[in-house]
Amino acid sequence: MLTTAPRLGPALARLLLVVAALLGTLLATAGPASAHAALTGSDPQDGAVVATAPKEVNLTFSEQVAMSDDSLRVLDPAGKRVDTGEIRDLCSNSTVRYGVALLPGLPDGTYTVAWQTVSADSHPISGAFTFSVGAPSKTAVSLPDTAVGGGLVGALYGIARYLAYAGFVVLVGGGAFVLACWPGGAAVRPVQKLVVRGWLTLTAATLALLLLRYPYTRTGELADVFDLGGLRAVLETKTGAALSSRLLLLGAAALFVAVLFGAYARRREEADHRDLTFGLALGGTVVAAGVAGTWALAEHASTGLQPGIAMPVDILHLLAVAVWLGGLATLLVALHRAPAALGRTAVERYSTLAFGAVVVLAATGIYQSWRQVGTWSALTGTRYGQLLLVKAGLVAVLLGIGWISRRWVRRLGEPAPAGDGTESGTESGSKSGTEAGTESGSAVGTDGEPVDDEPADVVDADVTEADVTEADEAAEVEAAEVDAERAEQLARQRAAVATARRKKERDADPERSGLRRSVLTEASVAVVLLAVTTVLTSTEPARTEEEAGPARTAAGAPAVPNRPVDVRLPFDTGGANGKGTVQLTLDPGRTGANALHIYVVRPDGSALDVPEVKVAFTLTAKSIGPLPVVPDRIQTGHWSASGVQLPMPGEWLMRVTVRTSDIDQTTIEKNVKIG
């Protein structure tokens, strides 16, 4: 016997509104997926001014990335590509470095380096920086405002990821609940619909992820979901292989669902039922573990520390989440749609199963947290750590609500068996109130007055045959209208009786009502928990962020200089021989002691002998300086100073004063980044 869900009171309505608000806020502030690999160095560095054009541009990352021919591009001031397009693998040991050669004979000006790639855990990363040859210049390069992995495509990809997790949880958890806790639930229609919808959701979300993958990681254009060349490129990647494998496994899952709700639901003999249960449990576990493995293969667990241990642990973690939360969803559906069929034994079995799942979840979660966070400070100092604390808090809330649910379970009684008089009494009441009313209604009119069924004996002689026909037709229409009104009234009466019967059943079982409310609250919190988990898998791990942190902040830019700072500054003092160029080299271009070499040359490149050259450094952001440097003359046009102390990293203003005669001098300046 099926029942409808109870009406939600004001408290539960407010709870659902709060849950919806939390979920909306969480998804609205999630933003594009953060990078799981970080750019930790470049050569040339961001903002550097070099005397001569480099032969190549190199990038260093915190972990392995997937590079293609278009992953690294170098553009001249006009936006024309000036690299050869051949990516060089410069990786050695734990250093992840890639480079691209530049065309020879590049003129002076500002060049833009744009890079876009995919980290080893499937998340796209991108960025851009500039360097100048000779002197900075204006550039016409226009980079997209939306980072890769963001915008509409990024939002759709995030929604598909969430739906994939939700579908997996419902599919696996619902199947486990039926097999382990409630075999009779295989024949309950609402439970069947729930599990089938979980399969459909996971399948549709996986297809969406596969189609969105190319624009998500490469172009950012939604129209490119139909690019067959892009789809072919995705299928050749690790993530593409994982998604296509998931689709194949979902075919096997469809067979599992068909047997579970077909032969298993109809099987009545104990021996055959037991054998089929064992086969379904074994096959279902293998398929579920395989589907969970598609996440472990392509995401966090496949990179970083101990991937050989992390991947099986991640599979166990996902299965435990599915058994717990998916079983909770199935229990909620059963309590709302089929409470009379759900016995105390099934609820107690789920309570035990959920406890085991929580133990596995806690053990695997602690290992994953240590692996991805690393230090206590990262729990509060990184976004990943903060999200992890939110997730832990939600799990604690779920456990508290689960404890309340267990109290209701202990007070829960077995459902009344069919035919105990309750249903028959209801049916007889229904008949006495409905059918009797229908029968008596045949003798009364719609206005409550008696209806005379006898034919009239007297007919007006003036009435013609046409009048009689017209009267008959009118009587037939009126009778049809009366019958339709009666049928509608009867339907309303039957619906009212059915609603009253359901309300009576719910009011007669307060324990189930209490359990239904607590499970509904658990499910609401679980929705938010699943959303936090989805965002967490798209966030840069705290360990990676902390390891890349010093490199990111060393010079106020994501690139770390690993070569001297070279600067060329044209000057004009206005007098005779007053035009030329000052070429400065600061080696190694970091905090601490540096060697400074200054070359003064004429416009034709020959050395220019000048009476005096002075340099001063100022760190405006920290109000440090100016720190004067008086170099020594080494030879014609060459000046040098050793032990130039720059105490802090940052954007330093370098002022160079050149005097070409007793009265002709000029001061030129340039900002340089010191690491």
Image: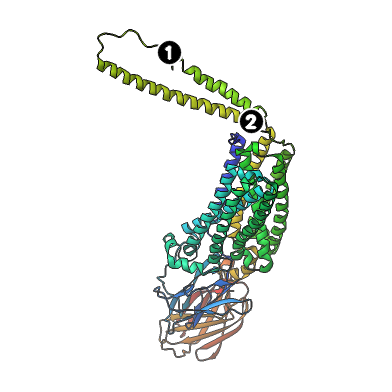
Colour approach in the figure? rainbow
Q: Residue at x 69, y 55 (%)?
A: 361
Which residue has dot 2 on it? 505
Say above or below: 521 vs 71. Answer: above
Q: Is residue 400 visible?
A: no
- First-in-chain label (1 vs 2): 1
Give whichever of 391, 653 is nearer the camera. Answer: 391
Give whichever of 123, 506 is nearer the camera. Answer: 506
Q: Residue at x 53, y 55 (%)?
A: 203
* Dot 1: element: loop
Q: Is residue 9 visible?
A: yes
- In whole angstroms, how far apart are the C-alphas of marks 1 and 2? 39 Å
Residue, far bottom: 635
State the quadrant of the N terminus.
top right
Q: Is residue 61 left or right of residue 569?
A: right
Which residue has dot 1 on it? 451
Q: Residue at x 70, y 47 (%)?
A: 270
Say above or below: 130 vs 612. Answer: above
Give whichever of 131, 547 is nearer the camera. Answer: 547
Q: Position of residue 435 (x, y in %)?
A: 53, 22
Q: Amino acid at mark 1?
A: Val
Q: Amino acid at mark 2?
A: Glu
Q: Position of residue 61 (x, y in %)?
A: 58, 72
Q: Residues within 10 Å of mark 2 (few under 14, many from 20)?
A: some
Q: Specify the quadrant of the image occupied by residue 512.
A: top right
Q: Position of residue 315 (x, y in %)?
A: 65, 60
